[in-house]
Image (cartoon, rainbow, N blue to C red):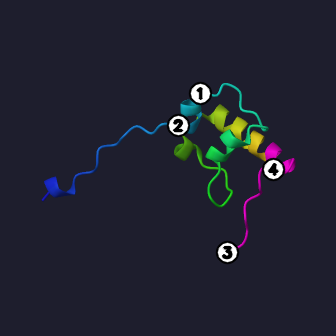
Amino acid sequence: MASSQRKPVNKKKIAPAKSVRIGHIDYKDTATLRKFISERGKIRARRVTGLSVQEQRKVAIAVKNARELALLPYASTAR
């Protein structure tokens, strides 16, 4: 019975920041920033994106700056 309830083998996630190979996160690069935003317009969590703490902070600041300049939409509140 224990053999039928095995956990699936964990595959290593490829972080969006690593796959893009970006050194500097810029608020004007909306195509890259959209990879870190969910369908509903929320910034994805660190464990989802696979970023380090410093990288996640830079992404969050860049997304907020892009939203301020109307390059990216704010999170939708409609349900």
The residue that disc 2 covers is: 15
Q: Element type at marker 4? A: helix
Residue at 21%, 57% in the rendered image: 5
The residue that disc 3 covers is: 79
Residues at marks 1 and 4 touching, judged by CB atoms closer than 8 Å: no
Q: Does the segment drawn in magenta span residue 73?
A: yes
Q: Does the segment drawn in magenta span residue 37?
A: no
Q: CA distance from mark 3 to mark 1?
A: 35 Å
Nearest to the observer: residue 54 or residue 36: 36
Residue 2 appears anywhere in the view: no
Nearest to the observer: residue 28 or residue 41: 28
Q: CA distance from mark 2 to mark 4?
A: 23 Å
Q: CA distance from mark 1 to mark 4?
A: 23 Å
Q: CA distance from mark 3 to mark 4?
A: 21 Å
Q: Is tag 3's residue or tag 4's residue first in the polypeptide sequence?
A: 4
The residue that disc 4 covers is: 67
Farthest residue to the right: give it. Answer: 69
Span highlighted in magenta in the image: 65-79
Residues at marks 2 and 3 touching, judged by CB atoms closer than 8 Å: no
Left or right: where 3 falls relative to 10: left
Q: Which of the two discs, 3 and 1, sits closer to the camera? A: 1
Mark identifier at residue 32: none
